Image: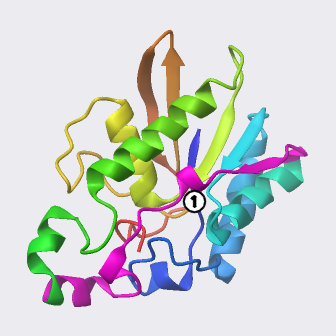
Amino acid sequence: MLWRHGQTTWNLEHRFQGQTDIPLDETGEAQAEYTAKRLATLRPDAIFTSDLSRAQQTAAALSKLTGVPVTPDKELRERAGGDWEGLSDEEIRTRYPAERASWNPPNGEPTAAVADRVAAAFTRIAGTLDRGQLAVVVSHGAALRLGMERILGLPALGVGVLGPLANCSWSVLSLVDTHWRLLEYNAQTVPEPVIGDDR
């Protein structure tokens, strides 16, 4: 199960967060606690998280309810946003129209590199599980989406085949033999506006 972190002030302001370490805001903390109650009923066997604080705070809400320890993994970090980090979507569109069209931030991490890194982390984590076990992986909007697209063999179009993930939404991947399947995408417990990629 892949779980996007809760809301931050930069999400609310439509700012590109990338690897800038922004914590959850009050709404994000409430989203994490509310969603953790639902996910806890699935009795996860392991919890892995990006080492950025917004993901760690989200994972901690589930760990508190289940007693399952959290394992930080820097390979689950959001893409490095380079010159875009901290900028609003409007600023990015104005200053970097060509790069915005292909979603490749100047001096940032290329889309293909993010997809490869996160898909490799998913595969490695799946390898730690026994048959029938469930891991919850807490990460970021673009990282999760790009990792899923890569592992499912979807084309790398830059703008993404799958739509953006809402804060605190989850998606479910299943590995049967050597084949990955997407069982659920962008599910959430409470309605909220979709604000785009992890900004």
Q: Which residues are magenta?
A: 66-94
Residue in view at x 15 percent, y 63 percent: 102
Q: Which percent across, then down, holds residue 108?
A: 32, 69
Q: Which percent across, then down, holds residue 123?
A: 52, 30
84 magenta-colored: yes
64 or 87: which is nearer to us?
87
Residue projecting furthest to the left: 98
Q: Secondary structure at mark 1?
A: loop
Is 38 placed above or below 50 here? above
Q: Quadrant of residue 29?
A: bottom right
Colour pattern of the rendering: rainbow
Q: Is residue 74 left or right of residue 37?
A: left
Q: Quadrant of residue 96?
A: bottom left
Is 51 placed above or below 132 here? below
95 or 180: which is nearer to us?
95
Q: Which percent across, then down, holds residue 14?
A: 38, 82
113 or 141: which is nearer to us?
113
Q: Is residue 181 left or right of residue 156?
A: right
Q: Quadrant of residue 110?
A: bottom left
Which quadrant is the C terminus positioned in?
A: bottom left
Residue in view at x 68 percent, y 82 percent: 26
Which quadrant is the N terminus positioned in?
A: top right
- The residue wearing badge 1 is 168
For the question of whether residue 165 can be seen, the reply is: no
Say which amino acid is labelled 1: Cys
